[in-house]
Image: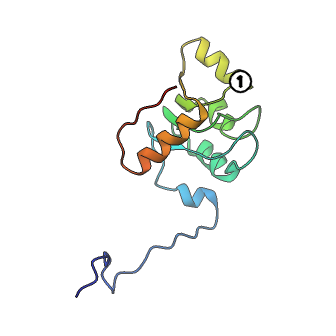
Amino acid sequence: MPNSCACIAEDAPLKSKVYPDAHAALAGLVSDGMTIMAGGFGLCGVPEHLVSALRDSGAKNLTVIGNNVGCDGHGMWQVLANNQIRKVLASYVGENKILEQRYMSGEIEIEFNPQGTLAERIRAGGAGIPAFYTRT
């Protein structure tokens, strides 16, 4: 019986997933208006090199999904400070003065989610589940 998981021709070369740096990893992938989801909780677990490469890409009108949008000088704050973010889906934004100013002036949209609901939205989306009920 043929292997039903064989998706690549045996003679087709596999593309390497190893890159010399974050800029090379994002080359050709980042574009204006795209949605980016990045890890991190406060100052912990943030993919700092990828965030810097995203900032350097110059992509505009981004939607960013994450626990927060960083804080002064750290994390996704770099991309926000570079005026590249249009919309944020997050559970906490309390210590980000740039985000506060841009939200209050109508320059940026924020969709707040309780942390557990945000995590479930991410999980459900990854599983192909279009909607779910929550008591929040």
The front one of 84 and 104 is 104
Give the total number of marks visible in the rendering.
1
Q: Position of residue 59 (x, y in %)?
A: 51, 40
Q: In which quarter of the image is residue 103?
A: top right
Q: Position of residue 37 (x, y in %)?
A: 54, 44
Return the residue found at the far left: 1
Residue appearing at x 46%, y 53% in the figure: 29
Say which quadrant the N terminus sits in: bottom left
Asked whether, in this view, residue 118 is left or right of residue 53, the answer is left
The front one of 91 and 63 is 91
> Where 65 falls versus 96 (above or below)?
below
Residue appearing at x 59%, y 39% in the figure: 66
Asked whether, in this view, residue 40 is left or right of residue 84, the answer is right
Return the residue found at the far top: 105
Its colouring scheme is rainbow
Q: Quadrant of residue 114?
A: top right
Q: Where is residue 122 in the image (x, y as percent from the top left)?
A: 49, 43
Pointer 1 residue:
94
Q: Residues within 10 Å of mark 1 (few under 14, many from 20)?
A: few
Circle 1 SS class: loop
Residue appearing at x 66%, y 47% in the figure: 52
Q: Position of residue 9 (x, y in %)?
A: 30, 81
> Where 1 falls versus 19 (above or below)?
below
> Where 65 falls versus 101 (above or below)?
below
- Amino acid carrying label 1: it is Gly
